[in-house]
Amino acid sequence: MNLEPLLEHVEPVGQIPPVDRWHPQQVGEMDLKIVTDGRWIHEGTVIGRPRLVRLLSTLLRHEQDGHHYLVTPVEKQRIQVEDRPFVIVDAEQDGQDWWLTTNVGDRLCLGEAHRLTVSDTPDGVAVPEVAIRFGLSARLGRNVFYRLVEGAEQRTTDTGRIELGLSSGGVWQPLGELPDDPS
């Protein structure tokens, strides 16, 4: 999959192609892995060009078979993703809303369409994630998690557990549950 010609036309904040509507017949597998910290590794080498990573991220989707694919109108290539393909690297509050930015330049407002959920990492640690697009999601980076925790509040869930979270976009956004015994 030669992506160099496409790179010339991709801007860091450009439009996301309609990869959800592309259904190419040519399918393969590429030696590309997105590791837990958000680095993209091709054939054992970290991709150091941010514009290339941005381009690749706009061609990525997660399918019902549980795999991640880079998709163009003519082919799709399966890649490996250790946990989530993106990491939230920044958060800023604007009034009652929180805006998040991913490591590949996506910016979104936490709300109904982009809600935090808490799920386990491959290491079994419960960490919030947020849906981005095309079945893809991003984990909160550690620094962003702690920044959100600073402004968080506690609520009791329907099961009687104490949950930490915040409101954004008029929606409760959970950050995690507090232990029963805080000692």
Image: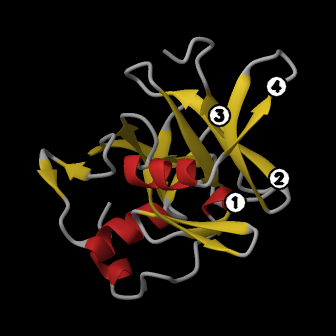
Q: Which mark is residue 157?
A: 4
Say which element carries label 3. loop
Residue furthest to the top: 181
Q: Position of residue 47 (x, y in %)?
A: 20, 61
Residue on which disc 2 sits: 171
- Badge 1 marks a residue whose secondary structure is loop
Q: CA distance from mark 1 to mark 4?
A: 20 Å
- What numbered label is drawn on residue 110? 1
Looking at the figure, which quarter contains the N terminus?
Answer: bottom left
Tell me the CA gap for discs 1 and 3.
24 Å
Distance Cα–Cα, label 2 vs label 3: 27 Å
Q: Amino acid at mark 1?
A: Leu
Residue 65, can we see it? Answer: no
Q: Vertically, is 160 above or below 71?
A: above
| Up/down of 144 relative to 98, above or below | above
Q: Is 106 situated above or below 164?
A: below
Amino acid beneath label 4: Thr
Q: Which residue is mark 3?
A: 64
